[in-house]
Amino acid sequence: MKWSLGRVRGRLIALLPARADLAEMCRDPRRDLLAGLTVAIVALPLALGFGVSSGLGAQAGLATAVVAGALAAVFGGSNLQVSGPTGAMTVVLVPIVGQHGPTGVLTVGLMAGVMLVALAVLKAGKYMQYVPAPVVEGFTLGIACVIGLQQIPNALGVSKPEGDRVLVVTWRAVEEFVKAPNWTAVAFAGAVAAVMLIGGRWRPTVPFSILAVIAATIVAQLVGLDAAKPIGDLPAGLPAPSLAFLDPGGLGSLLAPAVAVAALAALESLLSASVADGMTAGQKHDADRELFGQGLANIAAPLFGGVPATGAIARTAVNVRSGAGSRLAAFTHAAILAAIVFAAAPLVSKIPLAALAGVLLATAIRMVEVGSLKAMAKATRSDALILVLTALATLAFDLVYAVIIGLVVAGALALRAVAKQARLDRVPLDRRDDDAEEHALLAEHVVAYRIDGPLFFAAAHRFLLELAETADARVVILGMSRVTTIDATGALVLKDAVEKLGRRGIVVMASGIRPGQRAVLDSVGALELLCLEGREYATTPEAIQGTRTYLESVGVLLPLPAQKSRISSEETVR
């Protein structure tokens, strides 16, 4: 067995925190504590808002920020990453809540955590870098739109309509608002969003989100606005850990959602960690350790009623800009949120839902990087198409299908681009040692081609059809030294072309077949045809000499004098 128990145990030990991590945390604790406090202030309204948006309530968002935030900080692979509930994860969770209820979300989070730990053990972190940039930009744009649309019911002050399709729910919410307008809620949401967006441009270092939420809460309490519906009662503290939600019989139906959650958690966390690396000098995350930390975080969070978590790009960026140098800052952020849960739950419960909707509306707007979108759209038509399709699929379906569609389209367009690089070039014969009459006679009966590029399923049919239809020749010289790769489809099409030429009495002389290509050609019977009667040559000059000999043997050419039988050693066809 390749993965023995001892090897798995050794791999898990390698993923655990090292002494260097502790030493880093002790280097400048004051700076990290201040950074953690700043991040906690920014994270509080986001944790509350994403908890509400997920359908499990504000307390679920806080529990996630505390439990997952602490564990991911300690066991993750980035010194600067901040984890918790995110808008992207909320987009995936809403339909799960609609189909399986809150207990289904907790079970999915637990299953996804186990999957992430398994991915870490299998060293799968390196593969996340292969997701194309247009796909990432496309689903980020789609997520921003979905997050914004999800806030419409609370921003309009209406109860969330039934349904798990965000466009349908938004339309129904607008209809309810038209019947009974709640301009107070609209004013709260609009004011909070405006303060965040305008204030963020004016003073980026000031946490306008928490200031706006506090101001909205004070106004709602002083004026006594019934239309400004508050969050509601929050428990003072975290619940005792429990597995009461787990139903072993329902695990099968939750497998697909769990895979989706695990994939999103891995992708978003590693993307966030990469962003953090790019914002600093000398920092580089460990992808597998990051998956391990996120896995432990997602295993633990459901035990306390929390939703699945990922690395949060916005909070991570705030952490870096606040001067964080180690994982102590992210851990401090979780500890401060825990203190708020235990000490200030009654105050937090009075925050108007419309104010949180304003926070998330502003967050959704900030997620859209107009400059990046313009650059991606101008790069190539393929990149623009992938971006738009991924964004639309996120709105029409869900994030998982959107990423799959984006990857499939990106892969198809990449294959198309590679296939276009493959060419079948007709190459003139060298006439260096022939007189004009002899060369004309040779060229009349011989056609030389050179295959340049990949010979695989996406390219082979296009140009080998031309080869099979070659007319007015006794011999075809086929140079293959520039074939970069070949697959079974390419070998089969090549075999078919050689057989068609043979049925028309045309002999094929092959040259330059590489050792790595012989196994593929041999597996479909193409190598045998190319090597028939010794008609395979190492170089093209040798193939031309063999062609001359063949034409002499069938009486097409007269034997040359000894002094003219030499063929130039200079290659003309590769």
Image (cartoon, rainbow, N blue to C red):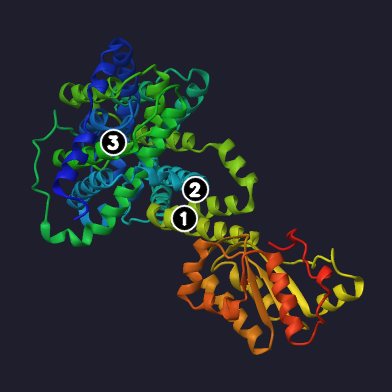
Q: Disc 2 residue type?
A: Pro
Q: Does residue 26 lie above or below 288 as drawn?
A: above
- Closest to the camera, between mark 3 and mark 1, is 3
Label 1 sits on residue: 407
What residue occupies the far right of the structure in this picture? 436
Q: Quadrant of the N terminus?
A: bottom left
Q: Give residue 158's mark.
A: none
What residue is rendered at 27% in x and 33% in y?
A: 230
Q: Disc 3 residue type?
A: Arg
Q: Residues within 10 Å of mark 3 (few under 14, many from 20)?
A: many
Q: Is residue 232 shown to the viewer in this render?
A: no
Horizontal side of residue 557 vs 543, given as left or right: right
Q: Position of residue 296 (x, y in %)?
A: 21, 39
Label 2 sits on residue: 132
Q: Earlier in the sequence, mark 2 or mark 1?
A: 2
Label 3 sits on residue: 289
The residue lying toward the viewer, choosing from 174 and 56, is 56
Q: Does residue 250 lie above or below 229 as drawn?
A: below
Picture quadrant of residue 549: bottom right
Q: Position of residue 445 (x, y in %)?
A: 79, 80
Q: Earlier in the sequence, mark 3 or mark 2?
A: 2
Horizontal side of residue 93 vs 144, given as left or right: left
How far is mark 3 from mark 1, CA to CA? 25 Å
How far is mark 3 from mark 2, CA to CA? 23 Å
Q: Are marks 2 and 1 in contact (CB under 8 Å)?
A: yes
What residue is rendered at 45% in x and 42% in y?
A: 144
What residue is rendered at 45% in x and 48% in y?
A: 131
Q: Disc 1 residue type?
A: Leu
Q: Does residue 94 lie above or below 356 as drawn?
A: below
